[in-house]
Image (cartoon, grey):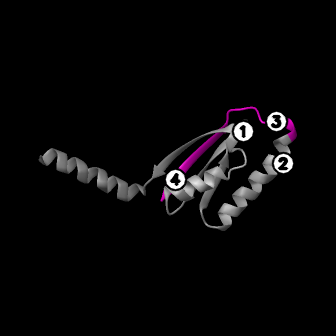
Amino acid sequence: MAFLVHGRVTHQVPPELAVDLTDAYVAYVKKWKAEGAVDQVWNYVACLGGCMIVNLASVEELDRMLLEHPFLPFMEVTVEPLVEAEAGSERFKDVFREMMAA
């Protein structure tokens, strides 16, 4: 299952934790990339936050992954499930054909 995960720091990160949390975040990304779960990771410009595309077997695995995120206590996270564009477009057309035939 593919997901687009958006995260943005919305609560003040204590300055004394910022460097250690950032080091932990870099290690977190490396871990999940090495496991093949993370396809891409991007940081937003001029703010604390970013997005990543992940591929996991279940929502439960995604939950585990997000719970391990070092900045999670300071973040707002949104998740959007993804489908491959061509297959999703075909399903979309099939549904509308069925609706029009009814």
On screen, 31 above or below 22?
below
At label 3, the amino acid type is Pro
Circle 1 or circle 2, nearest the eye? 2
- Disc 4 is placed on an element classified as strand
Q: CA distance from mark 4 to mark 2?
A: 27 Å
* Residues marked 4 and 1 touching at CB (< 8 Å): no
Find out whether residue 97 is within the magenta segment.
no
Q: Is residue 5 left or right of residue 9?
A: left
- Disc 1 is placed on an element classified as loop
- Disc 3 is placed on an element classified as loop
At label 1, the amino acid type is Leu
**Image mark for residue 14:** 3
Q: CA distance from mark 4 to mark 1?
A: 20 Å
Residue interval drawn in magenta: 1-16
Precedes in sequence: disc 1 or disc 3: 3
| Residue at the spot of label 4 | 3
Measured from the top left, where is residue 44 in percent x and y?
Answer: 67, 41
Residue at 74% from the left image edge and 51% from the top image edge: 25
Measured from the top left, where is residue 37 in percent x and y?
Answer: 59, 62
| Residue at the spot of label 2 | 20
Find out whether residue 14 is within the magenta segment.
yes
**Image mark for residue 48:** 1
